[in-house]
Image (spheres, helix red, strand yellow):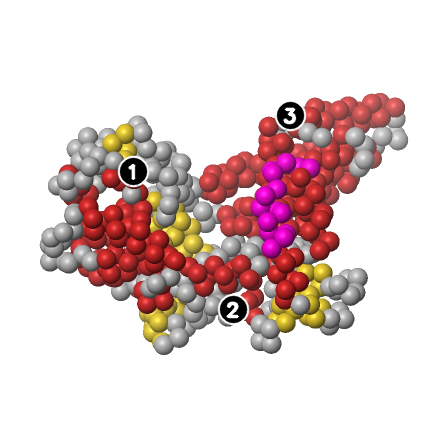
């Protein structure tokens, strides 16, 4: 673990519990923490996967006869293997009760690293808030009961008495404190196929904010790297986000209440318009251009133009219908366009549910562009992809104004859409060469921004690979810009002689041949 002692100071108060503040002034983009996980394992209710690399499982460890492995992995953690070898469990116990893996690994820390065990047990589990709830009953059925009935903890685990209460506590702290691990890399350098999660005790000391001042990046070896998204002053609380940026306030608050057992009071959550993005607002029934937002202080849905109040029953009905319609929509372009048009009128074009459908549509259009020769992609597809990027990117930039992975990826896609559409429009003579040059220069600026946003990503992650690709494309784009500039110089000389005219036409044709089939 690097950076914690130098950059973090641990404090405690009744409202926040234990939390951390900056020990010194931090710069934007500065890495302030590198932490390895104390425990890693599958997500809750995940498909059975190899417990060594988290790829799909196709065999069982020959030593313990219990742990799922993949074709390439012949062994796993030695202490874990020894534990299961002595457990007497039947061969398919973990296949039938895969949700017990993470709690068992936490308990095993008591034997292998007592200090780490006590550190994770000091983390917040919200045990009393969870007691008797639906999530408590689920863990009782799928974790506590299988483990207690298996008899593997019938006797004291060294000096530790393992009870159902202890297992519930561990389940709670895992739910509240683990982070997603993507693209995990094994010793051979190849990536896993399934999502996993890791427990990082120092990282979880940071409190939640929907507009955080830090950003987490989990590299391909399960280590978490924390960066400052903007300048942070000494003594300022360090926070992270446990929610998705493009979720509306209601969905974010619901997620936090159910999973983390608290209500966020950040600047975005307090603003009914969500910083002017209107991700949660719906159209007014009285005026043409009014949007009704929810005010939490005096609970009401009020129009920002005519101040008309909407009944909560109407709002709930509209939102439920839109959510059901969008979730049930097939991932087909025509169906997605239908639900987008329909709910843009009732909600608004930038409502989080509409944006969700637009993201799905953008993914479908991107697939068409990637699987088809560039010159064969229908122009309406290119134009619609560009329009969607134009609509989504400003929202992300408003919600994540500092260093942002999402903004970096969206900016890259926007640059690609702008380049593709500009090339096609030039090929069909809808724009002249000087307009093409302007668009390519703009795309170059966007691509540089995307690279700057994603440079912190480790090379073993998908985003790290995207940075490598983006840097290659930046070099190619600059070469293309140079060609277009030369082409414009030829055009400026075309009136001097018929020979120059022929050179100008030749330059145009050469450009189309060289760059028209890219992407």
- Looking at this view, is 138 or 302 the one in front? 138
Circle 3: element type: loop
Evaluate if marks 3 and 1 touch, with contact meaning CB atoms under 8 Å apart: no
Circle 1: element type: helix
Mark 3 crowd level (few <14, some 14–19, many ≥20, 10 Å Cα) = few
- Residue for badge 2: 266
Question: Relative to 215, does residue 472 appear above or below in the rendering?
Answer: above
| Residue 15 can be seen in this image | yes
In the image, what residue occupies the spot 25% across and 51% down?
A: 145
- Residue for badge 3: 373
Residue 395 circle label:
none
Cα distance, mark 3 to mark 2?
A: 46 Å
- Residue for badge 1: 95
Segment tinted magenta in the rendering: 320-334
Cα distance, mark 3 to mark 1?
A: 44 Å
| Residue 124 can be seen in this image | no
Examine the residues drawn in magenta and state their main secondary structure. Answer: helix
Among numbered discs 2 and 1, the one appearing first in the sequence? 1
Among numbered discs 3 and 1, the one appearing first in the sequence? 1
Residue 45 as seen in the image, left or right of residue 354: left
Image quarter of residue 437: top right
- In the rendered image, residue 326 lying in the magenta stretch gets the answer yes
Percent position of residue 212, x then y = 48, 62
- Looking at this view, is 465 or 201 the one in front? 201
**Quarter in which the C terminus is drawn:** top right
- Looking at this view, is 219 or 267 the one in front? 267
Among numbered discs 3 and 2, the one appearing first in the sequence? 2
- In the rendered image, residue 48 lying in the magenta stretch gets the answer no
């Amino acid at each position: 673990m690097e950076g914690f002692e130098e950059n973090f100071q641990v404090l405690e108060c009744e409202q926040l519990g234990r939390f951390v503040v900056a020990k010194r002034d931090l710069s934007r983009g500065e890495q302030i923490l590198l932490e390895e996980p104390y425990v890693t394992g599958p997500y809750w209710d995940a498909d059975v996967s190899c417990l060594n690399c988290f790829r799909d499982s196709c065999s069982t460890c020959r030593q313990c006869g219990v742990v799922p492995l993949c074709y390439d992995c012949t062994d796993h953690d030695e202490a874990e293997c020894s534990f299961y070898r002595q457990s007497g469990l039947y061969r398919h116990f973990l296949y039938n009760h895969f949700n017990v893996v993470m709690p068992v690994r936490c308990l095993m820390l008591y034997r292998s690293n007592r200090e780490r065990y006590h550190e994770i047990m000091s983390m917040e589990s919200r045990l009393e808030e969870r007691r008797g709830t639906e999530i408590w009953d689920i863990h009782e059925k799928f974790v506590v009961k299988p483990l207690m009935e298996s008899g593997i903890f019938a006797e004291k685990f060294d000096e530790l008495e393992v009870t159902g209460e202890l297992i519930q506590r561990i389940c709670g702290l895992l739910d509240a404190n683990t982070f997603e691990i993507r693209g995990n890399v094994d010793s051979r350098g190849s990536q896993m196929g399934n999502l996993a999660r890791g427990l990082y005790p120092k990282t979880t000391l940071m409190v939640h904010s929907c507009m955080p001042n830090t950003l987490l990046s989990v590299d391909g070896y399960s280590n978490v790297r924390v960066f400052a998204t903007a300048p942070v002053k000494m003594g300022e609380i360090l926070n992270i986000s446990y929610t998705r940026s493009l979720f509306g306030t209601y969905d974010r608050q619901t997620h936090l209440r159910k999973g983390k057992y608290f209500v966020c009071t950040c600047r975005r959550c307090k603003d009914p318009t969500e910083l002017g993005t209107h991700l949660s607002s719906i159209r007014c029934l009285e005026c043409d251009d009014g949007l009704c937002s929810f005010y939490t202080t005096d609970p009401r849905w009020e129009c920002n133009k005519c101040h008309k109040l909407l009944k909560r029953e109407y709002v709930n009905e509209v939102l439920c219908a839109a959510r059901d319609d969008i979730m049930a929509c097939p991932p087909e372009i025509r169906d997605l366009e239908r639900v987008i048009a329909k709910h843009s009128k009732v909600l608004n074009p930038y409502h989080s549910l509409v944006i969700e459908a637009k993201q799905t549509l953008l993914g479908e259009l991107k697939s068409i562009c990637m699987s088809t020769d560039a010159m064969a992609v229908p122009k309406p597809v290119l134009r619609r992809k560009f329009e969607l990027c134009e609509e989504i990117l400003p929202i992300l930039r408003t919600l994540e104004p500092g260093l942002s992975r999402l903004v970096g990826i969206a900016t890259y896609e926007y640059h690609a859409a702008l380049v593709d559409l500009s090339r096609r429009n030039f090929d069909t003579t809808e724009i002249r060469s000087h307009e093409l040059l302007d668009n390519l220069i703009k795309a170059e600026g966007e691509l540089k921004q995307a690279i700057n946003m994603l440079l912190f990503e480790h090379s073993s992650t998908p985003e790290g690979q995207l940075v490598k690709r983006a840097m290659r494309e930046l070099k190619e784009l600059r070469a293309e810009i140079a060609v277009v500039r030369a082409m414009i110089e030829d055009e400026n000389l075309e009136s001097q002689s018929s020979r120059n005219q022929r050179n100008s036409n030749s330059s145009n044709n050469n450009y189309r041949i060289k760059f028209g089939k890219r992407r």
